[in-house]
Image: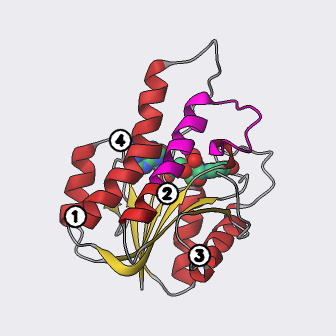
Amino acid sequence: MNILITGANRGIGRALLLEAQRRGYTTIATMRNPVESAYYLDLSEKDSIDKFADELVETVDILINNAGVLYKDNFGNLDYENFIKTFKVNTLGALFLTEALYKRGKLRQGGKVVNISSVLGSIELTSGTNSFSYSLSKAALNMVTKLLSNKLKGISVISVHPGWVKTEMGGKEAPVLPNDSAKGILNVIEEINDTGVFVDYTGKLLPW
Ligand SMILES: NC(=O)c1ccc[n+]([C@@H]2O[C@H](COP(=O)([O-])OP(=O)(O)OC[C@H]3O[C@@H](n4cnc5c(N)ncnc54)[C@H](OP(=O)(O)O)[C@@H]3O)[C@@H](O)[C@H]2O)c1
């Protein structure tokens, strides 16, 4: 069984790559600066997404849309360009990569698409944010999950919140180690039979 992970060079993506290899999956890693056998993929570029989908030989069992960016911004101090950059990677990158693989018949029936989302994108849970652009992009990504769960018959599509994780994005104060988040996410992927749901890395159901 193979597993494709975007943004696999650092943070949660790298931990997912190592944990997947430990569990015996065949891994397909994408990076903006690829090392070893990884593929080049810049999710903010539509051409890069299409080129990668053309080049990929394998059919994907599990697609993990992990790559993401976060720019701190708040109301009164919003930066238009940051919104564009954030939506390109966090929302459109995941959507267009999934579509590019689907259209080429490279998503396997019975497989899974996993969008790494965030509680910061939950409309019901939100009481504020230190990044409007990020929260909006993840709320929209959750809509991608819901819409694709209806469209992709025979493929499970879920949103997963990885916890607050000690990475460049999560910062030093974060309580969860990347390795523990990755183990939890892979457990969720292996155990879940549902589609169109939002869960955290422990398997707890989250409200949209
Ligand atoms: N850490 C947390 O507490 C936390 C909480 C909730 C959700 N998340 C989500 O978890 C995912 C991973 O986050 P992380 O904490 O591991 O972040 P991170 O350490 O900042 O890593 C982000 C990853 O995304 C890649 N990336 C950024 N822009 C890209 C682009 N245009 N094309 C391709 N790859 C790109 C980065 O590659 P480069 O090295 O090339 O920049 C890197 O591999 C993200 O979707 C994030 O929103 C994280």
Counting residues from the start of the chain, the first of labels 3 and 2 encountered is 3
The residues tagged by marks 3 and 2 sit, at their Cα atoms, a distance apart of: 27 Å
Q: Which residue is mark 1?
A: 103
Real-space Cα separation, disc 1 to disc 4, in angstroms: 19 Å
In which image quadrant can residue 162 be found? bottom right
Instruction: Point out the stretch of residues depicted in magenta.
Output: 121-144
Reply above or below: 83 against 80.
Answer: below
Kind of residue at badge 1: Lys
Label 3, on which residue? Answer: 19
Residue 81: quarter of image = top left
Q: Nearer the viewer, residue 86 or 208?
A: 208
Residue picked out by circle 4: 44
Residues at marks 1 and 3, CA–CA distance in whole angstroms: 29 Å
- Type of amino acid at the residue the image marks with label 4: Ser
Q: Residue furthest front?
A: 150
Query: What residue is shown with label 2?
Result: 146
Of the image marks 1 and 3, the number of the one nearer the N terminus: 3
Dividing the picture into quarters, in which one does residue 108 lie?
bottom left
In this rendered view, identify the residue nearer to me: 73 or 136. Answer: 136
Three-letter amino acid code at disc 2? Lys
Disc 2 from disc 4: Cα separation: 22 Å
Label 2 crowding class (10 Å Cα cut-off): few <14, some 14-19, many 20+? some
Dot in front, 1 or 3: 1
Write the residue at 28% across / 64% down. 101
